[in-house]
Amino acid sequence: IELDPRLIAENDVSRLAMLGFSRMSLGVQDFDPDVQAAINRLQSFDLVESAVGEMRRVGVDDVSFDLLYGLPRQTAASFAATIEKTIALSPDRVAVFGYAHVPALLSRQKLIDEAALPTPELRADLAELADAALVGAGYRRVGFDHYAKPANSLARADLEGRLRRNFQGFTDDLAATTIGVGASAISHVEGLYAQNAKSLRDYYDAIAGGRLATARGVELSPREKLIGGAIQDLLCRSKADISGLLARLSPQEASAVCRRLDILEADGVIEWRGDNVTLANEARPLARIVAMALDPYENRASADSPLPLARAI
């Protein structure tokens, strides 16, 4: 379960533990007060430290932090301090996500000063900084944006080839079905995605009327499952056999995918040998660019060029 440190009331953690929640995640984002002020999310280090302490006290042995780079007013020095404080609190997992500024979709982001956002170059530097510090502190790099202590189940799943990625991130959960509860929640049943109504009013109206709150969904075709499988292999194991994928694409789509892969290989991002595409170890932060190159539906990239780096980091 994910918790907001600002909203944890007395005994909340112990009650959740008694209900069976064994992994708890805190949306930390950043510890720097100036950055917190810029995103209107004020939460002190002491507040987060207290929440972690309570989790450990009641026996929660899998504590996770979500951090964000690319936030307004972030600097290399301020983010390095955030990573240092994170390491000091010793969470079992750390996810380091890139902040996506999409005010057209999220109206609250219109309040953020775009001039204060880091440059694409600084975003890349922040991601590298976090990677070096966390790996140096003993965390295992999992995929391209997760880190876990070696004994954690996520690290073991990565080591044993059992890692999976879903719409929430990397996971060691092998369940074929995910049930989303609440407004905007996404459910996944084999080959089908469904999302609940985003607004609380629409969600409550549907539930009060005895109806499912599903607002939209998509059923994957056999071809889409095959494409998704190749992308899953690439993101989770850094390599994929693309022979089946290319065989199901039209000649034009297959040609476009191959041209994009040629460019990525020339840039040293991948190795392409026969039917196998392998992500270069130092290029793991660019995994999404390679995934996009494999996706014939990805129309934000031209047939001859992958997405710009700034959109993927």
Image (cartoon, helix red, strand yellow):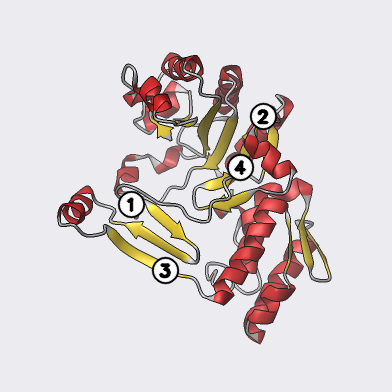
Q: Which residue is mark 3?
A: 218
Q: CA distance from mark 4 to mark 3?
A: 27 Å
Amino acid at the residue labelled 2: Lys
Amino acid at the residue labelled 1: Ser
In the image, which disc is placed on residue 149?
Answer: 2
In the image, which disc is placed on residue 145?
Answer: 4
Q: CA distance from mark 3 to mark 1?
A: 15 Å
Which is nearer the eye, 284 or 188? 188
User: Closer to the observer: label 4 or label 2?
Assistant: 2
Using the rendered view, name the quadrant where residue 81 is placed.
top right
User: Closer to the observer: label 4 or label 3?
Assistant: 3
Q: CA distance from mark 2 to mark 1?
A: 31 Å
Residue drawn at the location 66% of the way across and 86% of the way down: 251
Looking at the image, the residue that sits furthest to the right is 273
Which is nearer the eye, 202 or 188? 188
Dot 2, how many residues are within 10 Å of its Cα: few (below 14), some (14-19), or many (20+)?
many
Residue 75, relative to residue 310: is it above or below? Answer: above
